[in-house]
Amino acid sequence: MSTQQRFVMNTWYAAAWEHELDNTKNLLARKICDVPLVFYKTADDAYAALDDRCCHRAAPLSMGRVEASCLRCMYHGILYNKAGKVVEIPGQTHISNNMKVRAYPVSAKGGMIWVWMGDAELANPNHIHDFPPLVDKTNWRGFEKEAYLHYQANWMLIVDNLADFTHVAFVHTNTLGGSESYAYESVPDEVDELDTGLAIKRWHKNSAPPPFHQRVIPQAEHDVSLDRLNDIEMHIPGVFLMKTQFAPAAPEGKSDASDPHREYRNCQYMTPETWNTTHFFWNYLHNFDLDNAATTTSLKDSLFEGFMEDKVVIEQQQLLLEQSPDFVPRGIGGDKALTVFRKKWRERLNEEVADNASSGEHTSRPVNIRALI
């Protein structure tokens, strides 16, 4: 009997911010792609990830205790090394080779702990889509601690939301967008396919500063028309990286903001917890007023307000889709980017399914994502 593979496994997933495991006493239980995992920091400042189920009686290892680079189950005291192998059983000298749990490749990059859910031999940290501004404290300032939200929704619905910024005009009229005119006056000038996803550039020319930007610039600039560019990359499985530029509106015929006087950098990582729930990690950075904590606080509050507006819509969308499994979406012109991303994701999933079948590892079929979820 075939099974249904729901997730791309041979990829790096954002698992946790490093501040969530800021010392060797912390244990973090986090389910990713329907797999319960436990993350911990070792004595040598590395990270480890194991299945969060003791091989003895399935007690949660996340309720255990870190000992140097090992993790002890606090049900019967069984000790695991970071490779998942049992190295000590209290009162017992012989340890069978099958006493182990699965360990997952982990890499820390850009302030984020990344985990590889698939074939460990294919895990290459150079393929992680990290975000350099997160660790560039000279030129960029973000939150003191990067942020996290939990969605009661499929991660691809959040990806869809980010792939078409038309929604900014209606969902975020008074927060991130500024007016409904954004949907009519700004268009995605470029949507380019990448090997791992897509790139989008979207201009809004000769426009008023949106509310979140007005809150952090001088009052005298509120009536200055701006050219706004959102330059976006989206990568499988759910990595969103954006450069935003604001500059005084360029003269007629000039095509870009060649000298932006204020810029932002936005990273959002969507990691499936289950098919219908998502871990959402984010930060928003700016390159001005770097020592002004009020600027950072204002931007965090503005973005959080906007993300909560998204969250309400997307979680209701999830509920309706669960209640109407036969729903068939109808496309519009603005769907180009999300269609490209879903196509790329489906191709990767199909490749994995085919590779698994040819290797005899297991027989599976890919989930159908032609519908919204």
Image (cartoon, grey):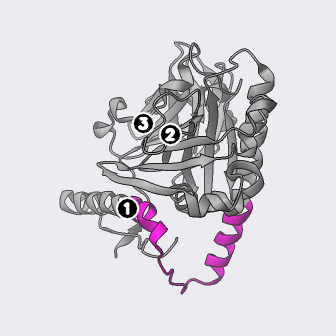
Q: Identify the mark at residue 340; answer none if there is no mark.
A: 1
Q: Nearer the viewer, residue 281 or 180?
A: 180
Bounds of the magenta span? 312-341
Q: Which residue is mark 2?
A: 251
Q: Is residue 65 visible?
A: no
2 or 3: tag closer to the N-terminus: 3
* Residue under the point 67% across and 77% down: 320
Above or below: residue 64 compared with residue 334: above
Name the kind of residue labelled 2 in the image: Pro
Which quadrant of the figure has residue 5?
bottom left
The residue singled out by tag 3 in the image is: 129
Q: Main secondary structure of the magenta part?
A: helix
Tell me whether circle 3 and circle 1 mark residues in contact (CB < 8 Å): no
Q: Label 3 amino acid?
A: His
Q: Residue at x 56, y 17 (%)?
A: 139
Determine whether the residue tagged by mark 1 lies in a helix, strand or loop. helix
